[in-house]
Image (cartoon, helix red, strand yellow):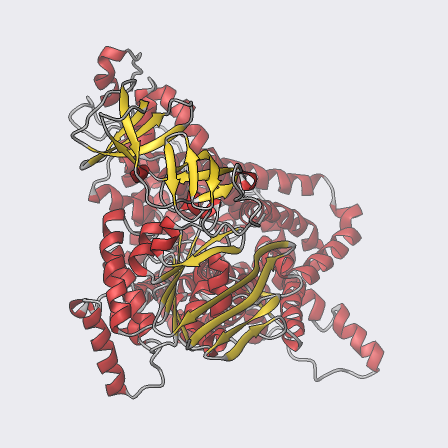
Amino acid sequence: MNALLELKNIRHAYGKQPVVKDLSLTLAKGDIGCLLGPSGCGKTTVLRCIAGFESISAGEILLNGKEVSNARFSMPPEQRHIGMVFQDYALFPHLTVAANIGFGLHRMQKAEKAARVAELLRIVGLADSSARFPHELSGGQQQRVALARALAPRPDLLLLDEPFSNLDVSLRERLSLEIRDILKSQNATAILVTHDQDEAFAIADEIGVMHHGEIQQYDIAYNLYHRPANRFVANFIGRGVFLSGTVLDSHHVEIELGTLTGEVPHQCGHSCRVCSPGHSVAVLVRPDDIVHDDGSPIRATVLHKAFRGADILYTLRLPGGSTALSLVPSHHNHAIGEQIGIRLEADHVVAFSQSDEQK
Amino acid sequence: MKGETFNGATGDTAAQNTLFEQSPSRHRAFPGWRFVPFLVAALVLVPVGTVISSLFTPSGEIWQHLVETTLPGLLVNTFWLILGVASGTAVIGVSLAWFTAVCEFPGRKFFSWALLLPLAIPAYVTAFVALGLFDYTGPVQTGLREWLDSDVSWFPDIRGRASVIIVMILAFYPYVYLLARNAFLTQGRRTLEAAQSLGFNRTQGFFKLALPMGRPWIVGGVMLVVMETLADFGTVSVFNYDTFTTAIYKAWYALFSLPAASQLASLLIMIVFAAMVLEQQFRSRMRYAENRQSARAARVPLTGWHVWLVGCFASAVLFFAFVLPVTQLVIWAASVFAQDFNQRYLEFLWHSLLLSSFAALLTCSVTLLVVYAARRYPDPLTRTAVRISTIGYALPGAVLAVGIFIPIAWLDNWTSAMTLRLFNIETGLIIQGTLFTMLIAYMTRFLAVSHSPIESAMQRITRSIDEAATSLGLNGWAMLRRIHLPMLKGGIYTAAALVFVDVMKEMPITLMTRPFGWDTLAVRIFEMTSEGVWEQAALPAVALVLAGLVPIVLFVRQTER
């Protein structure tokens, strides 16, 4: 693989508090990576270490195979050829849109520079606003100026620090798809940092879920949802509940609602003792794993319901007393307290040892 | 405005009867305070108008004489003074602001607040201490003569133009420092990072980005310095450096020519307005987005000899602007304490405290009314009046004294003539030379000082806060007492402290409008320094410095923590 960026066991601490612990990551040229995690998980710090604004206390960072950071050395940010889109955009308020975008092109000829600025203005759809000032633009437009400014010098790597957190939700969705198209059209390599999984799914090719300064799982979005590596990832990505189950054999787990088939447990990382028959495990059940079926003998009580247009998300109490979620087409409208029939419908198993409960 | 008890059913009417409801149809009569902004604006406009109109009145021999002899010198002196002080404060203020706001070096936290301390010392105090220290008979030159056993004739002339400029730079640089620091704190580090991510190093980032971006704040700070320089009377008179303010004073007291004084004042006012227009030009070309507090960005650690350089620079500024003058003041004050700390000194102190307290009380009360009126009636006319009422700060005290004295003298003469004619009573002159005149002059000058803290406190009381209070059953006086006053309290205290200290330090207005025999600390300092007895000026100066420290300590505690 042609690795553009490599982080090898990097570590960073603010005072005595470790923020990033032994983190490793590889990004291929042209890929869009993402660090996803709750606030305070250290994801922004990783980004700032890559940019060179923070130094690392152990490990090394390689860009194009060349070392740019280690415990004793840190190449100044301006020499790394890494572009950055800041959370607050950090647009220069005293310069026009065009001047902002052209700011990093100081080594270019005048004509070449003007052409590049014009090209970027066209790409981000702001050709009409080149003479305006940042404060005259809407939030989404400012965001695009920030992106264009960072892309202008054709950086080897582009870093995006929570780029959509200042925008409203409807704009976020549209802009994130738009930005993915722009990045891909420019063949840019980029890393995005966000706490919003929808954003991560919309933009990134690969996503690293971070928690407590460590990457819990680095994978494509599909696998994060369907094959979470541990309980943190399972909890953080999507919705669902854990039901306790018993391992029957290497391919079957029995839970209250029936028997699930699949590899047991998937990527658990534990020794096989855990998955041996008779062992008790926690099984992840997503809302779409439980379907409504009036003919089913299993009856559950409706505790809450959330109408979501096409479907209703029911919170159910199962006969055994535990709680589960079920996504049901919205014409099946049941009242709270009502008993409804449900059926398990899942084609794989995600199970974890009961012991790593509080991971 | 009458309070109404709240009950659920009439919630709507209660909401409409609050003190600050906007709909004009609901209130019955125009309350008097609606016109306070206009009254205060008149207080600014009348002196300005009086002074400027004197330009068009026929001038006598004295004016002719002034134009031929002193005017060219005044203009040259003023020009160099402004140029020197403005550029000096800009360089010192901006560089110190950058180091303390963006960089990291040992002692940064200490310097970031300590560098504000010189604000506590009135410039004329720094001036006479410097003169006392470095003059021919002062301890420095005397010591050098003894030590080197020579006449040290190479020692620069301490009474020259350069000294005035240096003293003023040391006294006024904190204005630029404060504003530039504010700009750099909110955007400096983030800007630097953005510049670096685009391939510029830190030095380029500073000159290409941070400096141009901070320009509105830097220009604002330098403008304050220019205003202070133009208004200064005490410092230049200590050094016998003739400027417009000293010329106005001399025309009044030495030549007894009110027209000459007022014509000089009109010229000074022209310069002030020119400076204000220039500043607007400078600023209005760029409209910046407001300062968002940006996300965290690391400070730039200084390394190697940079640490020493910056440390020495900051220490030197702090030493010459604060430590040295204060130490010398204390030494002098201690040496004369036994004989000078007497009934007379207490009288100066009492006069100063009394005047400052009354002025602070009056100014803050009027400001409150102005701010409320502007909130309640946000029409363009009222807003213009408010804006005019706060430019009094730009009027040099000497100008204001002349501009207020003339109409009051006219009013006095008129009333006494009227009473004589109508009631056949000889009243004499009632207002002239009373504390009332002084207080009005102080208020006109310092309304801007109290306006900004009270106004910004008022900004926090949003309409929805009023509405929330109303919905919970408060209105009228209850709202004022339980919501507004507690929320405004901090702003009012700050305003009062600032005005108090400013009035205490104030020199030309006090000198020119005080009732006979009403000597204050500042007056005492003026008299002692004009006789060149520095030691005797020290004791009152110490009191001023102590008072001056109060708002600075308050400010530092509020901002740095």
Q: Residue B452 sits in which quadrant?
A: top left
Where is residue A100 shown, x and y percent of the image? 31, 71
Where is residue B108 shown, x and y percent of the image? 62, 61
Where is residue B265 shown, x and y percent of the image? 38, 60
* Residue in the picture at 74% in, 70% down: B137
Compared to residue B466, the image places residue B210 above or below, namely below
* Residue in the picture at 65% in, 52% down: B541
Nearer-the-camera pick, A311 or B14: A311
Q: Residue B126 sits in which quadrant?
A: bottom right
Nearer-the-camera pick, A51 or B186: A51
Query: Is residue B65 at least partly visible in the picture?
Result: no
Nearer-the-camera pick, B86 or B39: B86
Query: Is residue A94 at least partly visible in the picture?
Result: yes
Q: Is residue B344 left or right of residue B22?
A: right
Where is residue B2 shown, x and y percent of the image? 29, 16
Nearer-the-camera pick, B18 or B406: B18
Q: Is residue A291 left or right of residue A318?
A: left
Compared to residue A291, the image places residue A99 above or below, namely below
Compared to residue A316, the image places residue B284 above or below, namely below
* Residue in the picture at 33% in, 46% down: B389
